[in-house]
Amino acid sequence: MITSQTTLAADVKQKLADAYAAIRSQAPWSHPKSPEISHHRVLPHATYSPWLLDDGFQAVYQRIKSHTLVDIYRCYELWTLGQQLSQVPGNFLEVGVWRGGTGALLASAAQADEAKHVYLADTFQGVVKAGGDDTVYVGGEHADTSPALVSDLLKSLGLSNFSLLEGIFPEQSAHGFSGKLALLHCDVDVYSSAKGVVEWALPLLSPGAAIVFDDYGFSGCEGVTKLANELRADKSFLFIHNLNGHAIFIKK
């Protein structure tokens, strides 16, 4: 329920200020394996929350939120990108599907566009290609899923505009993708896996297409942060670091 409010009571303002100050007082940190990547608690003062009154988004999000580890802020960004990229030639690809929550969001956002197809790629056996550039992941994490679980979720939402690509991407499953790319949602957690996905995708990106790195802004995913920072040197992209943790690259 959303209440009407013009001002906050003085005591509430002070409690909020104290809470913000306490959180921000935590010292910055970095992982010993990636000292060049600094972390601190990100706590913006912005309050506008359009997802609260977006009935279309809420109808889908309430159905999928238990099927994703992605918070509502990043989910809403994927939802709006999925809608805005309807005019960009190409299909959508998500690599790192887990239980299908964000894949279902993207397929729902694209449902009105008959020309768009959503490809959902995952090993369904957990994270692969963890290595020396990664700080926390060792491989095999997030294996608590299955193709049937993902397919059943999307079908329960009345979606049919999707295909599952099972296996390591791109080596084992990229042959199942066709067409150009309008959106790549890369949510694979580790450097080498993300690098392989992006290198495969680059030639297929349409002008105006977006690459979204889900893990860019998060402690424990420094490998993905490193890869995205390397991609920033490619001047054929516009780069956006969203404080929700996403890194977004727009193909010029």
Image (spheres, rainbow, N blue to C red):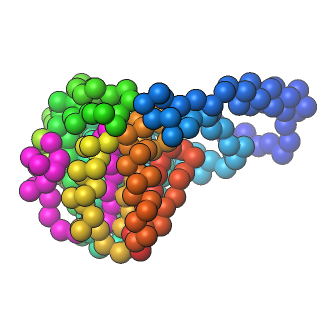
Give the residues drawn in magenta, as a range: 168-190
Using residue 166 as the reference point, say whether residue 103 is left or right of it.
right
Using residue 5 as the reference point, say whether residue 134 is left or right of it.
left
Q: Is residue 173 a member of the stretch shown in magenta? A: yes
The quadrant in which the N terminus is found is top right
Magenta stretch prevailing secondary structure: loop
Q: Is residue 157 a member of the stretch shown in magenta? A: no
Where residue 67 appears, as percent x and y from the top left, is 34, 33
Residue sitting nearer the eye, 56 or 132: 132
Q: Residue sitting at 35 percent across and 75 percent down?
A: 207
Q: Residue sitting at 17 percent across and 47 percent down?
A: 169
Residue at the outermost right position: 10
Where residue 98 appears, as percent x and y from the top left, is 27, 35
Q: Residue sitting at 27 percent across and 64 percent down?
A: 202
Where residue 8 appears, as percent x and y from the top left, is 85, 37
Using residue 228 as the reference point, say whether residue 113 is left or right of it.
left
The relative height of residue 232 versus residue 143 in the rendered view (above or below) is below
- The quadrant where residue 17 appears: top right
The quadrant in which the C terminus is found is bottom left
Using residue 57 as the reference point, say whether residue 98 is left or right of it.
left
The relative height of residue 223 versus residue 22 in the rendered view (above or below) is below
Residue sitting nearer the eye, 247 or 157: 247
Q: Is residue 25 visible?
A: yes
